[in-house]
Structures are given as C-alpha cells and as structure tokens.
Amino acid sequence: MKFATLDGLQAWLDHLAQGMDLIAPHDVDGHVLYRPVASSDEILFDYERPELSAKDYLLPATETLLRVKKQGDEVTQEQVLPDRQQVLFGIRPCDAHGMMVIDALFLEQDPPDFYYGQHRERTTLVGLACRQMWEGCFCTSVGGAPDDPTHLDVLLREVDGGYAVEAVTEKGTVLLKGLALEEREGEPPSPVADAEPVPVTPPEKWRPLFEDQMWMRHGERCLSCRICTYVCPTCRCFDVTDREVEVRAGVTRIERIRVWDACTSTNYRRVAGGHNPRPTKPERLRNRFYCKFCYYPEDFGPLGCVGCGRCVVSCPVDIDITEVMRDVAER
Amino acid sequence: MAINEPLTQQLRDQARQFLEDGQVECVIGYEASPRGGARPVFVYDPAEADHLIWSPDCIHNLVTYLHDKKKPRKRGEEPPRVAVVVKPCDSRAVNVLLAEQQIERERVLIIGVACEGVHGETGEPAARCVRCTDRVPVIYDVLVCETQNGEPPGAIPAEEDALFQGDADLARIEEMEPTERLAFWLREFDRCIRCYACRQVCPGCYCTTCMFERDDGLWVDIGIELPQKHVFHLGRALHLAGRCVECDECERVCPMGLPLSLLNRRLVREVEDLYGHRAGREEALTPLLFELGEEGSPI
C-alpha cells in the first residue's frame, strides 16, 4: 500500500491551501463542520461524522448566480461563476456517495445544472474512511461502506503511524503529485461495519402504501422544520429569488440567488393562488421518504439515501428513517 | 432513563378512559423512542393507550401540537377535542394560547403531570429545570402525580430545591460589554442553518405566514447568511416578549447548539421587571401587549 505520515499529509495540505480553496473538518465552537481552512493546523484529523454534509460546497446554502446593474437606461448583467480549484479534504465516503446521487439529477439529466457542474468540475474529493459506523449510520444497507472509495478521487485510511493512500481517479492521481508517499507492506485494517442491516424496499412496493396509516403515525410528530433536509447529503431542493442589494440615485443593483429549500417546510409545495397540495405534516414527511426510495430511483436511477444517519441523530422528535424503512419492508 | 411506573400507569388509565368515553379523539403524550428516551406520540385508539409513558426523558413541550388540532379534519366538521400531557413549564404555554384565543378551553383536556425535572440527551438535568421550582402545572383537568399524605406535591421554595441554581448563564451574558455581547451573538448566529426548528417547535410561534418567510422578502430575503439569521433570531425573540414561557424548546431542538433561550430569558426578565407580567402563569391573564394602562400603573 501507498503510505503517508501525518506530517507529510499536513505539509501537502498546507501547500494545496496556497493555491486553492481547501475545505476540511474543523471544530466550530464544539461542532465538527466542513469549513474553509487556511492551513492544516485548523483541520481535525480525528472526528466522527461532521454534523452537516459537504454538499454546501457544491450546492451552497446561498449562492449568487447573477448580478444585474441598472444605471439610467443601461442594464448590465454579470454571471457569477465559481472558478477557483477546490479540495474537499476528509469527507466521508457517504458524503461523496451523496454527490453521485445529486449528479444523477443535476448533471445527467438534460439540461444539466450549470452552476453545480462548475462546482463539481473545480472540486477534488479526498476522503477519509470511517474506522467504524457511527450512531445512526447505515451506509452498508444502501450500497455504501465506511471505506468505500467509489465516489472519491482519493481515499485515505488510518493505519499505524499514518495513512494508507489510494488514488481512485486520474484527478486524484494529479492532486497527489505533491504528497510524499512510500510503499509499505500490508493492508489497512477493515472498518468495523457492524450496524444492523436496514431493509431497502423497491419503488413498486412503496407505491401501494401511499395512503397507509403509517404516514400519519410517523408524520404527526414532525415539526415541519428543515433539519433533516439541510443535514442530508442528497436533499438538493432549492428556491431562487432576486434581491435588491443597492438602490441609490440612478443606480439599482440586484442579485439573483439560489438558496436551499426543504419539502418538509409548510409552504414548499404551495402554488400560485395559495393552494397547498401538501397541507399537513404527514403528507410532507411522506414526500421526503417517497422522494428518497420511490421517485428518485424511478426517475433518476440511484436511491436518494446514502445512510449517513445525520437525519436520524438530528431529528428533535426522533423521526427515524430506518424505522420507516423497516415499517415499509414489513408491509 | 427508567420509566416512572406509577405515573405511567396513571397516565395510561386516564388516557384510555378519555378515549373510551369519547371525551377526546386523540391523546398527545410521550412514548418510548426506538432510539432510547421518549418522543411525542398521538394515541387515537384506547387499545394503544399502553404506548404512553412518563419518564425524565419527556422533555418535549407537546403544547405546540395543539396548533395542528385547531382546524377540523374535514370541512364542515367541528375541530377535534384532544387531550395533551403537560409539565408545569408546558402548561404555561396552554394559558398563553388560551389568552391569545388560539385554542378553545372546551376542546382541550389537559393532563397535568407533577414534574420532578426532566433531562436532555446527556442525562444532566435540563437547563429549564434548574431554573424552575414548580412541581404542578398551572392549569390542568386531571393531575397525574404521586400523592404525599393524600396531597399532591406543591412548588418547592427555591432555597429548598436541590435542583434550583438560578440563571447563571444569563448573568454571564448580561455582564458582557455591548460590543462583546454582539460579537458573542454573531458568532452563535453564524452557525445557524435557518432550518426554522426553533420557530416550528415553539408553541408561541404560530403565525400563518412568518414575517421572516414572506414571499416578497419584505423584511429579510431567503438567503441563509449572517444578516438574515441575525434579524430572524432577534426578531423572533422580540415577538415572544411577554409571551415566552421559558420551556427552552427552541434551544433543545437547535441542531447547531445556539443558546437561543438566552435571548428570550433576557426579555422575560425585562417584561417582569417592567410590568410584573410572567407569561402563562395564570389562566385568564390578558396578553401583555393587549393591555392599555395609565402611565406608571402596573397593568
């Protein structure tokens, strides 16, 4: 196996941080979050599962798409394009898996999402394998694994004295050029993947359960907040709005922004005229689960869930996607 | 944490009876969560009354769910009658909703629980409990409690309450210089992801259209950025001035660990000092901002 020491890794990361945006797990007042870092000192190397997924760096929570300036009769438009190279370091395999899920809609459907595509293009994914499955995790039930290299450009695994380094893609190989690697005997230890399997039920089994009582049972306790969708690596719904950023004598500037949105929120589905086809909490929560296990796989291919477990541990009223999956399987 | 068997049994018996007698359509209470601890449950069938539990994990303020029961299920029907399990802190929210004419007294059966304190995920007593000396809800139709010499428990004087610690966290914030305090809050707000969990869980936040979520973005746009988050949290706190019952649910549900209830607690104290008003302490209390009084007179 290819091996790098922590020192070697840090020197490489410090070098990368000079020329590109480096995003890595960071301690933000006691919360582990992926954040831009200026040097390797700011990076956490020993952490569980960052509380939010890394999707913010491909589909930012708030992204300016366009700037428009009107001065007198003259209107100018400027498209805002992300162009700097970006490395997402230390992301978990489930985060990368989530990006593949979003790709299936945003890149592989016509027309592709231009801005997401730009972010994807400029980004290299350097993953760090989980040594075990964390609370709520079930990646092994939905086609992933704690050390799954599939959707990454580089995969690191913790080994004695440093890291086993695997270049998964050409992009990864290029990025690794500056890292001091040595050849070592042996293989990295397998992660502890002992989470109880969760059954995945195919879309055709979900369809007839649409009116089932279980949606009331699970959904009535829902608060209609947006936690589950915002922590999720595959939830990708957004809203777009134009906002005034400057109005002064003769000059008006507006920005077109796109912002995360959530199907669990009350007004998500409301249409012109005020009608809301999903007026109650159970209907909205049902949609989230149907999107992940029925609509998304039917329409775009992959399952809409990568088993990261974030929604499981962060729901304030203990709505548990694995409980729902088991209930559906038992019908 | 262990289920309190005697209170659980009383709760189940009471709930079963309410459902069997047709007094209510639904009992909103707590059940054992598959993840450990407790979670809200809606019991419609008397045969399922045995799902209900009482334990120190029953931290959620269930009063917020009454808003979902204000409308009839079908057009033309009456809104349902429901029963709700409340702790002393939660019960004050019932009074607020009654005073603000959000719920009808005859449509809500209140199952009060004499509370010895609840705790959060860490197992430590909840912050709300170390500031509280109440043991019995301020409003209830039936009380579930362990009687002492045939009498229900009463409030414990603060000096005799082993749990009571006052509000040291708020004192720390109040000691800060304004610039330091602003920096503290901006740092906290920065972590906010604008998931609205604090608003959604709050029994006092029930506007049909939240002013921070208007389609026209009149006050704040939809951006998930520091200025919007700053305005949202301060605005929400102000909208709860004189209405917040200090149940701390906003803070409990925050996925980013913002100490949100500090904002509300500061305003609770302000309102109490100015007007001697503490939201929801009494059933018939007129909402603070509905009352006009002579200058200088307590309302």
Image (cartoon, coloured by chain):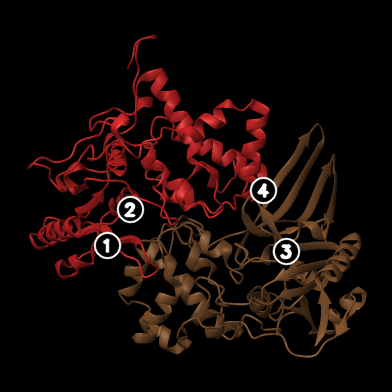
Chain colours: A brown, B red
Amino acid marked by disc 1: Phe
Front residue of A266/B247: it is B247
Query: Badges 3 and 4: C-beta atoms under 8 Å apart?
Result: no
Q: Secondary structure at mark 2?
A: helix
Front residue of B88/B294: it is B88
Query: Badges 1 and 2: C-beta atoms under 8 Å apart?
Result: yes
- The CA distance from mark 1 to mark 2 is 10 Å
Numbered mark located on residue B225 in the image: 4
- The CA distance from mark 1 to mark 3 is 39 Å
Give how far across and how far down residue B24 sits, in percent: 16, 56
Query: Badges 1 and 4: C-beta atoms under 8 Å apart?
Result: no
Front residue of A240/B183: it is B183
Circles 3 and 2 on the same chain: no
Residue at left offset 86%, top offset 70% = A8
Circles 1 and 2 on the same chain: yes
Q: Secondary structure at mark 1?
A: strand
- The CA distance from mark 2 to mark 4 is 30 Å
Q: In this figure, which residue is indicated by the disc labeled 3?
A: A57
**Going from the N terminus, do you reach mark 1 or mark 4 first?**
1
Tag 1 subunit: B
Tag 2 subunit: B
The answer to whether B285 is drawn above or below residue A77 in the figure is above
